Image (cartoon, helix red, strand yellow):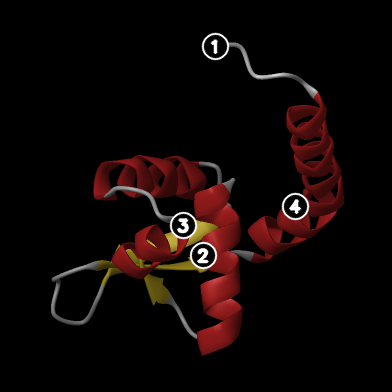
Amino acid sequence: MRVWSGAERLIRESNDAVSQVDVGRRAELDKNTVSYSMRRLDELGLVDRGPDEWCFAWRVILTRQGERLLQAVRPVLTEVARAEVERAEVEPVEA
């Protein structure tokens, strides 16, 4: 989810396709994790990806299907994350 939503935010900011490297930096994830995640998102039809004009890096952009699905699930995922933070604040830490 971090890769997908991170890509969406970068694309919105730049109004263009973005590099997987930049997505990884934004999401604070390593290159292998981002590459695997983008490959899966591409297979699912949620992003389009391809080499940049110099064939040096992968560039990605969300598909319409990817945009719609991300917008649909974002409120639920935000609520789950909020509940996890609240639970972590309440539960004692075991030593």
Q: For mark 2, what is the residue?
A: 7
Q: For mark 4, what is the residue?
A: 69
Residue at the limit of the structure toward the front, as seen here: 95
Relative to 23, say whether 70 is above or below. Answer: above
Relative to the observer, which residue lies in front, 68 or 33?
33
Which image quadrant is residue 49 in? Answer: bottom left
- Whichever of callouts 4 and 3 sits on the residue coming sooner in the sequence is 3
* Residue sitting at x 69%, y 57%: 65
| Label 3 with label 2: CB-CB less than 8 Å | no
Which image quadrant is residue 18 in? Answer: bottom left
Image side of residue 13 versus residue 67, left or right:
left
**Residue 2 image point, x, y percent:** 55, 50
Q: Amino acid at mark 4?
A: Leu
- Whichever of callouts 2 and 1 sits on the residue coming sooner in the sequence is 2
* Residue sitting at x 86%, y 43%: 79
Q: For mark 1, what is the residue?
A: 95
Image side of residue 10 versus residue 57, left or right:
right
How packed mark 4 is, by other alpha carbons closer than 10 Å (few <14, some 14-19, many 20 or more), is few
Alpha-carbon span between mark 1 and mark 4? 41 Å
Q: Amino acid at mark 2?
A: Ala
- Whichever of callouts 3 and 2 sits on the residue coming sooner in the sequence is 2
| Label 2 with label 1: CB-CB less than 8 Å | no
Asked if one can make out residue 74 in the rendered structure from this viewpoint, the answer is yes
Label 3 residue SS: helix
Label 2 residue SS: helix
Image side of residue 21 versus residue 75, left or right:
left
* Residue sitting at x 44%, y 78%: 17
Q: Amino acid at mark 3?
A: Ala
* Residue sitting at x 55%, y 54%: 4
Alpha-carbon span between mark 1 and mark 3? 30 Å
